[in-house]
Image (cartoon, rainbow, N blue to C red):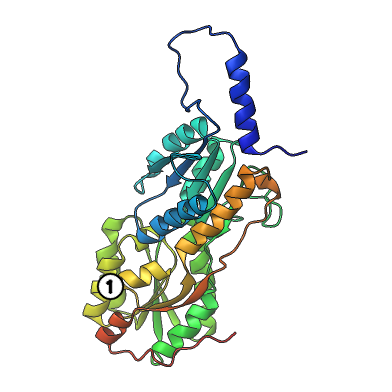
Amino acid sequence: MKKSLKTLITASLLTLTALPLVACGSSTSKDTTGDTIHVGILQYMEHDSLMAARKGFLAELEENGYKEDDKIKVDYQNAQGDQANLQTISEQLVGKNDLVLAIATPSAQSLATASSEVPILFTAVTDPLSADLVDSLEKPGGNLTGTSDQAPINKQVELLGQAVPGAKTVGILYTTSERNSEVQVEEAKKLLEKAGYKIVLKGISTTNDVQDATTSLMKDVDAVFVPTDNTVASTMTLIGELSIEYKVPVIGGSTDMIDAGGLLTYGTNYEALGRQTAKMAIKVIEGDKPSDLAVEYPETVSLHVNKEMADKLGIDVSKLSVTK
């Protein structure tokens, strides 16, 4: 019979109270009152999509009876996009929490190397297989499972053709160190070339590269495709300003990225994705093993248009539609 995290925590606390006190003044990293479940959260960096995923995750937990500072204790950490911070934070989180949420691929990869036992749920991860997080999507096999944010790029390419019918050259802006971006770029390049577009790739390393790279790209292309890339997402306001200056629309990415400076996407709602991940976390808290929970894809994917940006670019988006 499987035991839930709540049962295991309560049993451990009862065992501890029965042991003799051998070191007065010693302390643990967790509270030892009640059956509070300690949930760690490692967010890769600060931008709207990742924050929305975290907000949705916590909101769904609360609506299902797992309220912060009541049934659960949340330890939230943000690596601020610094790879050097990830491993240190990961080791701290798995050392003092019963379950950990990884937001974005780099966070999930770091936590995966920090523990093979603590249950880890991930979200905003595009391709868990190529990131070596799971053995398979149906049977993850280890201590990690969660939700992918992968949206149908073929629909984004279809919409690009409708919104910018005269486009011949499409630029792709992405971060070369993000595996999640590389996967999307490979797919987008294939689909765009099949649709007859000439492709110009522009890779960046940090946010410091964005202005020069985007400016250079927009001088040579008719539209820009961006994947759900963390570094790009964190600079979408700047990219949006350049989009207006050069009259080059930005397609793709997430709904939050479009709101910050893009034109349109057929993409993922990250708050809904966070809620979807929380439902999986609740299953783990109540006794399921991550190894047995299949990776899930977004349940909420939709056409999302920044009408203000469309007006500034002089693009008619009134007749956009996506084939089923």
- The residue indicated by pointer 1 is 240
Look at 32% across and 89% down and name the residue there: 315
Identify the residue at the far left of this view.
Answer: 245
The reply to whether residue 265 is in sight is: yes
Identify the residue shown where x is 28% and y is 72%: 240
Q: What is the number of callouts on the image? A: 1
Quadrant where the image shows the C terminus: bottom right
* Residue 163, horizontal then vertical, whole percent: 40, 88
Q: The N terminus is located in which quarter?
A: top right
Quick one: 56 or 161, which is closer to the camera? 56
Quadrant location of residue 25? top left
Q: Residue at x 39, y 56 (%)?
A: 51
Indicate the quadrant where residue 212 lies.
bottom left
Judged left or right of residue 217, residue 7 is right
**Which residue occupies 63% across, 19% down?**
15
Mark 1 neighbour density, 10 Å: few (under 14) some (14–19) many (20 or more)? many
Q: Secondary structure at mark 1?
A: helix
